[in-house]
Amino acid sequence: MATNLKQLTQNEELLCGGHRACAGCTGSNILRQIMLTAGKDTVVGGATGCMEVVTTIFPYIAQTTPYHWKDLAMKVEKALATDGPAFLNLLMPCTPGWHFDPAIGIDLAREAVECNFWPIFEVENGVYKINKKPKDKMPVADWMKKQGRFKHLFKPGNEHVLESTQAFVDKEWEKLLKLEESAS
Ligand code: SF4
């Protein structure tokens, strides 16, 4: 196996060009170095992260929750029928991580959509579509209040954090609406 740089650079380049990592990312460099050394017939696996998604162009991307079972089933079917890689992003309320009453896990998934924290949408070949637009938008703080992990934010003096969280969620929702508009 080659261990000198000159030899290494003469090995076959196995990470294709055209990845979508940030300019200057060292992750793609790491992959290149590993593959230049390991050679063909190597399977590279990694915990979910940038290197997993930047080396693949997804023709179908969708986001939903386990409360919206019909939407979830439809998106699983679409993902499986997609000719090429697809990506599903699901919100998964976690009892010990989020610190909530175990009876309300699914409700928290529903409310995350109702407060626009977790919009339900899909992107098919670059075209955005929002699958559900809440009629009466719930304040994000009402959703956060049910989760012990945010307890400290409801103490006096932290109102500004809740306000900036709401402003952030509102801004992101507006961006998503614009992306959908640009498709029509
Ligand atoms: S690890 Fe991800 S976010 Fe960080 S530079 Fe690389 S592509 Fe960008």
Image (tube, rainbow, N blue to C red):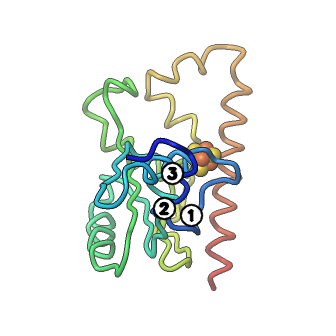
Q: Amino acid at mark 2?
A: Leu
- The residue singled out by tag 3 in the image is 8
Q: Secondary structure at mark 2?
A: loop
Residue 157 lies in what quarter of the image? top right
- Mark 1 closeness class: few <14, some 14–19, many ≥20 residues within 10 Å: some
- Mark 3 closeness class: few <14, some 14–19, many ≥20 residues within 10 Å: some
Q: 79 or 153: nearer the eye?
A: 79
Residue 40 point in image, percent of width and height: 34, 61
Left or right: 18 with respect to 37?
Answer: right
- The residue singled out by tag 2 in the image is 15
Residue 141 point in image, percent of width and height: 57, 34
Q: Nearer the viewer, mark 2 or mark 3?
A: 3
Residue 104 lies in what quarter of the image? top left
Q: Is residue 151 above or below residue 4?
A: above
- The residue singled out by tag 1 in the image is 19
Q: Secondary structure at mark 1?
A: loop
